[in-house]
Amino acid sequence: MYKPTLSKNAAISTIIAVVMGLFLNILLGFNVKAALGETLPPVPAGLKSHFALGLSSQPGATGWMKESGAAWDIRYQYLAGGVNTPGNWKTWQDPALPAGQFALDYLNESYETGYLPVLTWYQILQSSPAIGADEAGKDYSNLNNPGTMNSYFADFKLLMDKAKIFGKTVIVHIEPDLWGFLQKQSTNPANLTAAVASSGNSDLINYSDTVSGFARALIGLRDKYAPNVLLAYHISPWSSSYGDLGTNTDPDFNVEGAYKETGAFYNQLNANFDLLFYDIADRDAALYSSWGSPNHWWDVNNQVYPNFNRFNQFAAGITSVTGKRGMLWQVPIGNTLFESLNNTHQHWQDNRVQYYLGGGTNQHLQDLANSGIMGILFGAGDNNSTSYNDAAADGITNPAPFNGNSRVSEFSDDDGGYLRLQAREYYNRGTVTLQVVETAPAATVPAGPVNTVPSAAWQLVSTLNSASNSQTIVSQFNAPSNASGSYILDIEVYDVATGTKIAQWHPTQALTPGQILTLENHLQLAPGSYIVKQGVFNPDWSLISWQDGPTFQVN
């Protein structure tokens, strides 16, 4: 993740498709708060009802956003520099103005120009004294320093005060990376200490001196001083004990274990954040490759790893476990199409914009939305990464093509103009609607196996293998000869006695005519009678075929 350097004056802005073989193991897990699949969690109040696009954007920099021709929804800005250091965010304005005016000005400017403001609150690491051998150690030492935390909570309250004056919806994104480092230290935040009550802040005397107390204290300060603020918790796909999902090349990487552990850490905070921010890559893949780290490229065909479908599986699992929707944040901007991207300073290649916005279709955004993601915020992860504007100050550039990047740019944008063009196309063709998705077409369990929606073309067959309280459901989808494109393949398990849905899987899969796809899912069920339901839907969840089929008994 980009670490903004200390600055006194200016803002700092720098931030499953094809086959896994014929067998795909996807388990979303069951969340007692809200089972993903019965409905997606609600969209937080104050956010748009469509899949949103946004950018990192410094104060006074909305001109490019307007000129681009795309109806951008969101802009974001770091608040950084540390809470007890010179040059921190409270000083980023004319000294004659009140401390923290920078933030209020940014919020007002965003509203006046039509954009939802996001402030990334990144303060722990750059505060003093930051004792430790690495970032994780410095974070934890500051988190446990009463004097530092007294200043920290005072600064956070100041931000809340400014946000209350603003009075409209604003997202405050809390401490990128910090939660991941803490999860690496212990999977239970109640076992990690933090100076909360001991910070001396009079508002926080009843909060425990734990990481859980720290998270709940931030929620408490927001609730008391600025209820118009939405607080975003940061999800790092590298934070679990299973490794970095974003760079792991192992086909057998334990996605289920990763999302369950990461989601459980959040749940154990007992802090009701409003949404989640995901950091999927903080710099362009080619920049990482130049440093000897090639595994930051994601496969756009979703055949080898890492890839986009694996992340969708992870995100859907996190959504299920936490009951919170999220956004992708600080997504790299490079592409592999324009000659401008020649893998030099601020002109590095990547493929995430192409995957999500390219191809003339919203399918990949719909896949994200089906996983609980509400938007993408694009931004350069450091001052070397590719930007959407002419950050390199080198005008229109079209060096000799290589790696097939033969498109000639007519824009001075460091990415050749690809992001602006694709964002414009997205809004012009119509946005993806964020629905509270009702995925079960039947409200009650029928008396026996029936075809609720018969379809001679689609053949849907589920079988069950049971051993003690461990069950394996094998669901086969036989595509008809006219199948073409992506389909949601839905498998649901109900308790017959109560009619309650207790588990669901619904990957989006590209199928070819006549293809047979088998999904294998694993459960541990209490004794009782259960029924498996199986269906095929279009990406917008319009029903194609539905099969109620076998009931089984667990003893």
Image: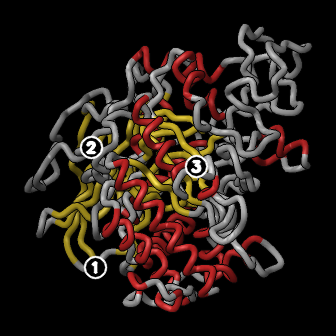
Disc 3 or 2, which lies upstream in sequence? 3
Observer-nearest of 339 and 482: 339
Which residue is labeled 2 in the image? 437
Is 311 left, or right, of 460 in this rendering?
Answer: right
Residue 110 spot, x, y in % from top left = 46, 36
- Tell me the amino acid under the disc marked 2: Val
- Tell me the amino acid under the disc marked 3: Arg
Residue 25 visible in this rendered orientation of the protein = no
Q: CA distance from mark 3 to mark 2?
A: 21 Å
Q: Residue at x 81, y 23 (%)?
A: 393
Within-10-Å neighbours for mark 2: few <14, some 14–19, many 20+ = some
Is 492 left, or right, of 68 in this rendering?
Answer: left
Observer-nearest of 285 and 77: 77
Q: Check the image and report above or below for 399 versus 26.
A: above
Quarter of the figure that contains the C terminus: bottom left
Answer yes or no: do the residues labelled 3 and 2 have beta carbons within 8 Å? no
Q: Circle 2 sits in a helix, a strand or a loop, which is it?
A: loop
Q: Circle 1 sits in a helix, a strand or a loop, which is it?
A: loop
| Discs 3/2, front | 2
